[in-house]
Amino acid sequence: MPRRTATMLASTLMLIALLCAGVLIPVPYAEMSPGPTVNTLGNHQGEPVLQISGRKTYPTDGHLNMTTVRVTSVDFRMNLVEAVYGWLSRDSKVVPHDTLYPKGTTEEQSSQQNAEEFSQSQESAKVAALKQLDVPVKSWVIVSTVVKDSPAEGRLHAGDVIKAVDGHAVKQPSDVATFVTKHKAGQKVVFTVVPAKDQAAAEKAHKTATTTQDVAITTAASDDSGPKRAIVGISAGTDHTFPFSIDIKLADVGGPSAGLMFALGIYDKLTPGSLTGGKFVAGTGTIDDNGTVGPIGGVDMKTVGAHDKGAQYFLTPADNCAEAAADKPSGLTLVKVKTIKDALGALKDIRGGNTAALPKCTAKG
């Protein structure tokens, strides 16, 4: 065989082998890309995203779009060719798999966590919006989740209202850990709770639950790498009773990052006039009961999705500003917000045409 022909054949075979390796060999990466954006003031799958009854609402216009990121699943194994394509694409981002899914995370666990965070973000959005309107909201601390095979399993249940720990009144979720960790592993801690079923019955009857019971639990040692803490295996959260009904209807979405936009949508529907002045505003950010806006992941993918949908302005958590500004889509104004009050002030400037006054994101934050 002539040397030139042999060289070409060897090169071709080597190229085929490399392509096969690129397709067959998995790499430890996952991919993020822009997901759907939904107008919180509009409809989704044929019904209003925000449904409010028992309180007067007002017409709205414009857009207050929440944004999402589409990510590959826990079990998806990316190959080298897909990773290279993702690295070269502007509309996707390749990140280490463990960044999105810590080792040992299952698809079921990931879905459950996303659902829980989404549910909590809705509750906090309602509280933050109503606080801005000086509408009173009743709150209490609950058992949010119970860890499987933990000391609390079968003793406490999700939705139980935690009134006290060892006789000390519980006023906020962090109190629970404070009181439990005063013990050593193996010691008993006593929870005074209103069982979830009694709380649900009282709420349905528009009454205050008064039936409590004491539950003694033997603590275990945490699996921290440092000093061991006493734990019982629960996470504490907050539940609320609202003076009227606010339902958020949005399927196939998870995580906490829509909180800010839900809060603004609720506020807009409960107040006369238009928050946006007819403009297309999108955004992202977690929100807590006090209206503080927190950072989220994948902000650069969300700005791309918002821009492609037609957004003119993007409400950006202050801690995400530098990342968002580093690769800002042309024509999209990034507005820095730290609280719901900041967002309301920015919307006032937007609808009034006073865009020079907007606190804009820069590469420095």
Image: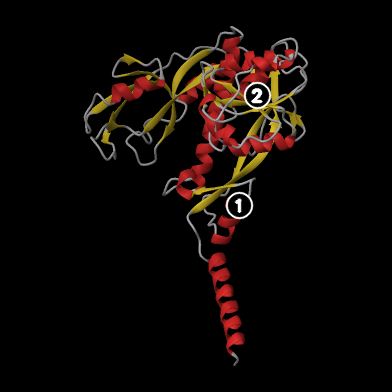
Task: Return the x and y of residue 77 as percentages of the image width and height.
Answer: 53, 57
Is residue 280 toward the left or the right of residue 97 in the image? right
Q: Amino acid at mark 2?
A: Asp
Residue at (63% x, 50% y) in the render: 89
| Circle 1 or circle 2, nearest the eye | 1
The tag on residue 156 is none
Which part of the image, by quadrant, shows the N terminus?
bottom right
Residue at (51% x, 65% y) in the render: 25
Count of number-bearing discs: 2
Task: Tell me which label, 1 or 2, sits earlier in the chain.
Answer: 1
Is residue 260 toward the left or the right of residue 219 in the image? right
Q: Which residue is mark 1?
A: 88
Asked which quadrant contains residue 157, the reply is top left
Residue 242 in sight from this viewpoint: no
Label 1 crowding class (10 Å Cα cut-off): few <14, some 14-19, many 20+?
A: few
Above or below 348: residue 102: below
Q: Amino acid at mark 1?
A: Leu
Task: Return the x and y of residue 57 as percentages of the image width and height.
Answer: 73, 13
Task: Return the x and y of residue 90 as percentages of the image width and height.
Answer: 64, 46
Q: Nearer the viewer, residue 237 or 304?
A: 304
Q: What SS does tag 1 mark?
A: helix
Residue 282 in sight from this viewpoint: yes
Q: Which residue is mark 2?
A: 247
Q: Tell me the distance, in whole angstroms, between the alpha carbons under discs 1 and 2.
A: 41 Å
